[in-house]
Image (spheres, rainbow, N blue to C red):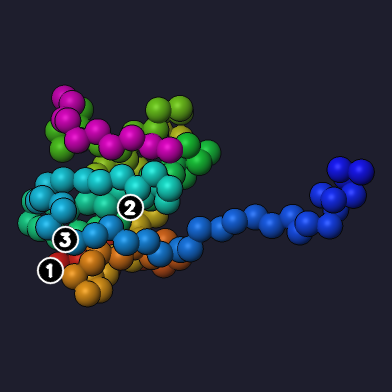
């Protein structure tokens, strides 16, 4: 009887919309990062006050990477690292070492009505990487 009722309901997957709001630019001080767990995105404000959004999904096998701003002797500017398979990226998502075949994706970030908005449907190249306010 229960299987009959389940058959009557549609089997729908909930998809999250591709854009999300971070909030006011003042939430991020220069040289700081926030992580959006739902979208697996780092939003970064560099020391010049520019913003960029970078995927936190490793391009090797899809693990969630970690932001490690604390320098180590090999990478004085800090790194983004994959805890599962050892890929290392610089703070802009460029592969430094490991099995990752390419850089992390960078997403479009805009300021709309004084709110930072990230669009994960728009992967951008290095020339469009920064939002300057």
Q: Secondary structure at mark 2?
A: strand
Question: Local crowd at mark 1 within 10 Å, few (<14), some, or many (≥20)?
Answer: few
Find disc 2 in the rendering and name its residue: 54
Q: Position of residue 107 (x, y in %)?
A: 36, 61
Tag in front: 1 or 3: 3
- Residue at 45% x, 27% y: name it: 84
Can you identify the residue that label 3 sits on? Answer: 25
Q: In this picture, which residue range is highlighted in magenta?
A: 64-73
Helix, strand or loop for disc 1: loop
Image coordinates for residue 69, horizontal then vertical, percent: 19, 35
Image quadrant occupied by the C terminus: bottom left
Whether 45 is among the magenta residues is: no
Q: Earlier in the sequence, mark 1 or mark 3?
A: 3
Look at the image and tell me whether residue 51 can be seen: yes
User: What residue is disc 1 on?
Assistant: 133
Q: Nearer the viewer, residue 63 or 12?
A: 12
Q: Residues within 10 Å of mark 2 (few under 14, many from 20)?
A: many
The answer to which of 41 and 70 lies nearer the viewer is 41
Labelled pair 1, 3 in contact (Cβ < 8 Å)? yes
Q: How far apart are labels 2 and 3 at the CA level? A: 16 Å
């Amino acid at each position: 009887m229960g299987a009959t009722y389940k058959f009557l309901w549609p089997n729908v997957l909930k998809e999250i919309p591709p854009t999300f709001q971070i909030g006011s630019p003042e939430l991020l001080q220069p040289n700081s990062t926030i992580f959006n767990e739902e979208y697996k995105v780092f939003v970064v404000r560099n020391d010049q006050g520019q913003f960029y959004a970078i995927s936190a999904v490793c391009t090797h096998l899809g693990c969630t990477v970690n932001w490690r701003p604390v320098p180590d002797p090999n990478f004085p500017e800090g790194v983004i690292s994959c805890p599962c398979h050892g890929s290392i990226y610089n703070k802009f998502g460029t592969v430094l070492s490991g099995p990752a075949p390419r850089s992390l994706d960078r997403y479009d970030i805009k300021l709309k009505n004084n709110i930072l908005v990230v669009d994960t449907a728009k992967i951008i190249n290095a020339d469009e990487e920064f939002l300057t306010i």
